[in-house]
Amino acid sequence: MTLRLGDLAPNFQAETTEGNIDFYEYLGDGWGVLFSHPADYTPVCTTELGTVAKLKDEFAKRNTKVMALSVDGVESHKGWISDINETQHTEVNFPIIADEDKKISELYDMIHPNSNENFTVRSVFVIGNDKKIKLIITYPASTGRNFDELLRVIDSLQLTANYSVATPANWKKGEDVVIAPAIKNEDIPAKFPKGHKVIKPYLRTTPQPDL
Ligand code: BEZ
């Protein structure tokens, strides 16, 4: 099944390191990140899961719950978590799905057979509080992900969900944003009372509206 931006994120029930979980129940009315990694007891994945654990407060600030997945079993995950905690100086604080039958990996198209037939690649799905898919990124097994970038995209997505703006290249929270092309010039002052700049008729910026 090919999932695309804007599609409803399929719900599932999964065996995880924190028991059996219904994905939608786990997300509640917040946002979610579902991310896969190739295998337990591998070096890059160890650093990735440790990094995500350390970002717990950052995800919580964004009302975002995280869930990881690989095709290894729960006992393997649990043993590996001890290693992650020890080597990355943290406590893994999110569930890891044990997708041994590959049901969820296939549902989310996380196995790319020309890369590897048996293991999931590094897929990331950001799911909005409407349960729709807002972001899909796929990294190869050999490249650890940049989770600061993931937080940055969630900031952008949550901002643009609430205001008629978009975020420019390399935007970071607090920087000016781009006014959506659909907004007419005459409507800008009422919508963006903090002021705006017209750099070109199609390139208009305003301070981040929710700060
Ligand atoms: C890793 O997590 O280190 C890894 C996993 C699969 C292939 C290459 C690296």
Image (cartoon, rainbow, N blue to C red):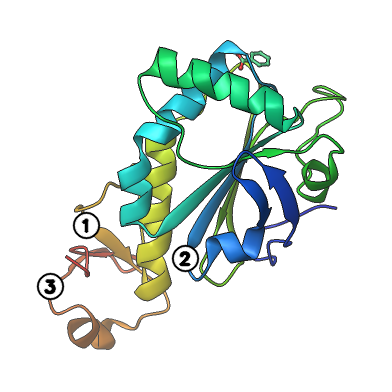
Which residue is more in the foreground, 31 or 177? 31
Find out if the beta carbon at label 3 lies less than 8 Å from the nearest ligand 1 atom: no
Gap between marks 1 and 3 measured at Cα: 11 Å
Q: Position of residue 130 (x, y in %)?
A: 56, 72
Quarter of the view holding residue 69: top right
Please identify, in this view, whether the residue under mark 2 or under mark 1 is nearer the observer.
Answer: 2
Quarter of the view holding residue 182: bottom left
Which residue is disc 3 drawn over?
195
| Mark carried by residue 176 | 1
Examine the rendering and report whether any part of residue 5 can be seen: no
130 vs 192, left or right, is right
Q: Amino acid at mark 2?
A: Gly
Mark 2 Cα shell of 10 Å, populated few (<14), some (14-19), many (≥20): some
Please identify, in this view, whether the residue under mark 3 or under mark 2 is nearer the observer.
Answer: 2
- What SS does tag 1 mark? loop
Q: Position of residue 197 (x, y in %)?
A: 17, 66
| Mark carried by residue 30 | 2
Vertically, is 3 above or below 45? below
Find out if the beta carbon at label 2 lies less than 8 Å from the nearest ligand 1 atom: no
* Between discs 2 and 1, the one toward the N terminus: 2
Residue shown at 72% from the left, 62% from the top: 11
Examine the rendering and report whether any part of residue 98 can be seen: yes
Quarter of the view holding residue 102: top right
